[in-house]
Image: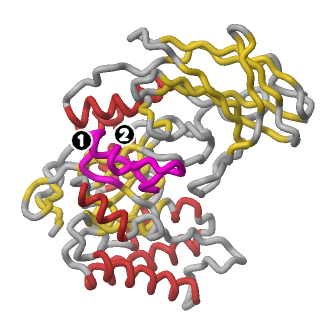
Amino acid sequence: MVKITGKKGNWSLEVNGKPFYIKGVGVGKMAGLGGADYLKMAQELGANAVRTWGTDQGTQEYFDAAQKYDLMVDAGIWINYAKKDTEYTYIGDNEYKKKKTQEIMDYVIKFKGHPALLMWNIGNEALFFTKDEEERVALAKFLEETVQMVHKLDPNHPVIYTSADTTALPYIQQYVPSLDIFGMNIYGSVRISHTKWDKSGLNIPYCVTEYGPHGPWDVKKDQNGASLEESDQAKAAIYRNMTHEIMNFKGYDIGGFAFHLGETSQESFTWWNINQKLLKKASYWELYKIYTGSRQVNLPPRVVELKLSKTKNIAPGETIDITAEAVDIDSNPLDYSFSVSTAQEGILQYYVNEEVPAKFENVGAKFRMTAPAVKGLYRLYLFVNDGNGNAATANRSFKVE
């Protein structure tokens, strides 16, 4: 049984009568494309909980594996944001609402007795991406109906809705009084978000359901109009600082989920992931130190430089020189590898970008790339492996025209 106890300032999530503060990480897909076991990596990280986003992710296999690794699951149930002139509307009786209600009922009934279940996470930023006000109100009312239904089906687990930062606060306050926990995806200051939540007077605890580096909406663009991804070290500092901020508000919040452990290719192959497949990046180790209280034996390398001789007006198949340099504080020999992907941004999917064929060769201390044959905007990635389970990454955009 999982429940909220206490009052504002000393709220606590209890699992089978024992306090449970979430030291979490988002793991949408439990297995990597190459077979990596990301729930095992979550356990090694020191996490005690993982988050999914949809019923397609939180499968029987996922729940069973989480239980094996002593991880609790914030079980995501995706609800689409509403958009006029599409099937996704919450106004009146319609087939989408009926279908979604049945899906939620079936999912709750199937997994409500699983020992790894922590809570039901119904919706992720759906109110934010719904731009029509009438639809927002209708969606919020649908959410209230859904929360009440889940409470009846399963009175032993709380229900959370995830907001884009604090944007859903007025809708939750007015239309969703049955909600147990307010979720916030925060890519900025936890302190600022906490203050807004606190001033709202919403009398339920919050959970930081996603947090991590700055998104493409907050960073500068390069000469090709692509968002400039922060360095591994800059990201690691953000994860460290935000995790401490979350823990400082314990009693108001019930913990948080760092985003992301796995292979999501939103924005880029490396933007959100604290790992590079089975290899661990600086952000992974910052979380590890906080979650376990221990330090890693071997530090990851650091990329010092990644440059292309041309980044635009590149002809299909043209040869481009690459300058790449990394350092390793432990003096490990470093292995350099490269890949190219598409460069789409800001799409609500798990896998957005895909690898594109490109040829690479060593030329002395430098490297050479044969550009893709198809015109378009791409990202070139540098992956540095220290041979001890760690990686450093960097990328630059280039345009074949």
Quarter-wise, where is residue 215 in the image? top right
Residue 172 visible in rendering: no
The quarter of the rendered structure image containing the C terminus is top right
Mark 2 Cα shell of 10 Å, populated few (<14), some (14-19), many (≥20): many
Residue 168 visible in rendering: yes
Q: What number is the disc on residue 286?
A: none
The tag earlier along the polypeptide, 1 or 2, is 2
Question: Residue at the location (65% across, 18% down)?
Answer: 306
Q: Nearer the viewer, residue 121 or 268?
A: 268
Q: Are marks 1 and 2 in contact (CB under 8 Å)?
A: yes
In the rendered view, does 319 fall on the left or right side of 326? right
The quarter of the rendered structure image containing the N terminus is bottom left
Q: Above or below — where is 256 with respect to 144? A: above
Q: In the structure shown, which secondary structural element does the residue marked by tag 2 occupy?
A: helix
Q: Nearer the viewer, residue 209 or 10?
A: 209
Q: Please state which amino acid type lies under the numbered disc 2.
A: Val
Q: Nearer the viewer, residue 357 or 72?
A: 357
Residue position for label 1: 249
Q: How many marks?
A: 2
The percent position of residue 21, horizontal first and vertical second, equals 19, 49
Question: Residue at the location (42% across, 32% down)?
Answer: 280
Residue position for label 2: 190
Question: Residue at the location (44% across, 47% down)?
Answer: 36
The percent position of residue 308, horizontal first and vertical second, equals 75, 19
Magenta-drawn segment? 25-50
**Distance (Cα) linking label 1 and label 2:** 9 Å
